[in-house]
Amino acid sequence: MTSLPILRGLLHTRSGPLGTELERSPGPSGIGQVPRRLVPEGLMRSACGFCGTGCVLEAHMKDGEAVNIAPRAEGHVNLGRACPKGWEALSVLEAPDRATRPLVRRQGRLRETSWDDAARTFTTEMKAILDKHGPESVAFLSTGQIPMEEMAFLGAFAKFGMGLVHGDGNTRQCMATAVVAHKRSLGFDSPPFTYADFELAKVMVFVGANPCLAHPILWERVLKNPHDPTVVVIDPRRTETAMAATEHLPVAPKGDLALLYLVARRLLELEAVDRDFVAAHTEGFDAFVSFLAELDEQDLLTRTGLPRERIDGLAETIATGERVAFFWTMGVNQSFEGVRVAQAIINICLMTGNIGRPGTGPCSLTGQANAMGSRIFSNTTNLLGGRDFQNPDHRAHVAAELGIPVGRIPAQPSDAYDQILESVLSGRTKALWYIATNPAHSWISQPDFRDVLGRLDLLVVQDMYTTTETAELADIVLPAAGWGEKDGTFINSERRIQRIRKLRKAPGEALADFHIFQLLAEYWGVGDLFREWSSPEAVFDILRRLSGGQPCDFTGIDGYRQLEEAGGIQWPLRPGEKLESHERRLFEDGRFFRPNGRALFEFEAPRKLPEAPCSRYPTTLLTGRGSTSQWHTQTRSSKSEVLRALAPEEAYVEINVTDAKALRVVSGDSVIVRSRRGRVRVKAVVTPAVAPGQVFMPMHYPETNQLTLASFDPYSREPSYKACAVHLESAAGHPREARRPGSRHDRRI
Ligand code: SF4
């Protein structure tokens, strides 16, 4: 191996001056070159690294280190506000369990080692598996949490360098449904709205979304709306947003598709169709009308659990609304029929002409900070730039842009996440490489998932902390820098590309994921393929080129400097196009991204619940975000004392007052919740916010996914986290069991 000088260069860079970035390399390795200062002392701006809202934060720099952080007062996104996670973004970097040195499992224990040893072990073990079992035997699973440049580097190295076929990300768990719905209906994964629409809409319909808690800064923009909008919430629970809304429709769990079809039918009866728009810009409307006419109204009403008048009332509100916008998040996406629900929302927008105009549109709100960047550049199911692995022209174009042999680009797309896990069970996949995600907490139906991990020959985890449920099971842990310790870009929910900045040094020997990929490429022996990938800014230039000619074309952005000066730029910005407005929406000309320029009405009859309540498991378990201060598996948010203090420490289940009485429990009592997969003991919270026969558990506690059912949308392969059948009983009389350790199995390398 000739990689030791490169390693020394990376470790030197890691401890180099703050506010610096590597010069684009003229040298042989592109690594370890002279750093240049990008931003001096004072204030440094960076988009937040938690959710897809993309709030801009301002760090106060002293002696080259960020000492404090606050929301930026100007700009186009957060208008001077941040939620508690943004305010605490720096403190989560200071945790004592940060991964500071590589770890390799030997004699059953994870032991500290050098980067050289870790990179050699990674390379030797992975190559041995690939040599023995072929290119489909190793897969990577990444995240919407790392910058676009790192994500693209990972996808390019894994597929074009290592020769892997399969790789997916935790964005499968949140946004895959919206992606597929956009692609099928609009021709590209293209949320059309801009955040200004929160302040322009006159009717706002939130479906399976609780922005008061999950997207609080966007909810603040609803509160700033000067048009006194009618706000309707469609959700089984009386969420914080439902309480604040004009109207709450407490639809039965997964009755949303039936409800939206009933609304569409009523809109037809009211003749509230924008016939000119439909005729000029869409396809499939007549078939949609025939489909709706054939549906059994009583069956649809039963599925919604709502009286007809409530649904008719919503249709009338939409029919008379001048500017109607629909917003959706995980209540729609994380469903066994989520794509059809998202398309049902898009269908209503299309038939009423509520798209491409201010204050309108189907608006999918993103979960993770860079989920949108992942959707375009992760190189997993789509080839870089939203292209198609199966299309030879697309492969040739990407190969030419990157200067690599076209034969290095696989001619098949990756399997989806659940299919990769299935292939571990079938014996095809032997090794997984996880980057910045914690699936041993977050993946659906943990008992099944632990079985999958137990069958692997090799599990590599690359993350900021050594104590995540997944890192503790790994064979190799690669210590990574976190948000705030590296440079790059994120794309937020409204397609805005924003800079993220290095505000602090990473601890110990932790490296930016970008540098880890550079290092592994050298040890793998394919460093020459990635000479141009010498810094995040150099990769941004590559990605700009790769976006050319695609709907997401941003070749008109000069580079990082223009992004910083503009405070973020929404794609597209085509070559020669001037940035005339900071609030740009898609489809203003009614031309969509499908080959014929028309949006498509697509639809399908509602399906059965994968696991309906029954006499043994009579209660429906709903899941979702529990508080603004908690983030996903709490890998980061639990590291902040402030954020911990703002949320319950122990797992809990919300139970309706009537059900609690029948169970003889009050708030604070322990209850046992059982599903066909598992059994957990949690605290009861008695509340009228959930309906009788339903309970709610936040996703942030590991107990929740002990219960959930592994079922998936057939089109997006997104897990259906939101409705499975459980049984509840008081824990009185049940002895407390010792918590099962998360051990995988002893392993020697
Ligand atoms: Fe960060 Fe999202 Fe909170 Fe804004 S709303 S500060 S982007 S976590």
Image (tube, grey):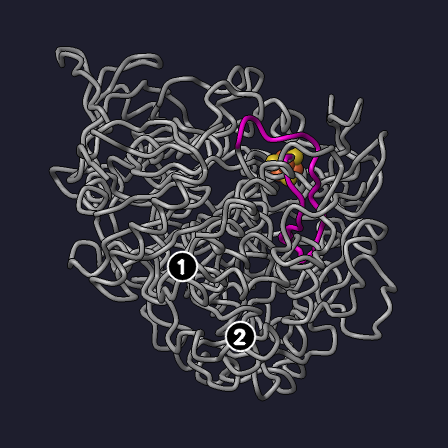
Left or right, 717 with respect to 216, comes to left
Q: Residue at the location (31% across, 45% down)?
A: 723
| Viewer-proximal residue among 512 and 60 | 512
Q: Which residue position holds label 1? A: 338
User: Label 2 crowding class (10 Å Cα cut-off): few <14, some 14-19, many 20+?
Assistant: some
Residue range in magenta is 485-509
Q: Does the residue labelled 2 lie within 8 Å of ligand 1?
A: no
Place of residue 639 in the rendered image (x, y in percent of width and height, measured from the top left):
51, 21
**What secondary structure prevails in the magenta region?**
loop
Place of residue 279 in the rendered image (x, y in percent of width and height, measured from the top left):
62, 86
624 inside magenta stretch? no
Place of residue 234 in the rendered image (x, y in percent of width and height, measured from the top left):
49, 48
Q: Residue at the location (17% across, 46% down)?
A: 455
Q: What residue type is labelled 2?
A: Ile
> Any mark on residue 404, and which?
2
When the figure is inspected, residue 322 is found, relative to residue 611, above or below; the finding is below
Q: Residue at the location (52% across, 63% down)?
A: 345
Q: What residue type is labelled 1?
A: Gly
**Local secondary structure at mark 2:** loop
- Residue 20 location, quadrant: top right
Place of residue 280 in the rendered image (x, y in percent of width and height, measured from the top left):
65, 86
Q: Quadrant of ligand 1?
A: top right
Q: Residue at the location (56% across, 25% down)?
A: 92
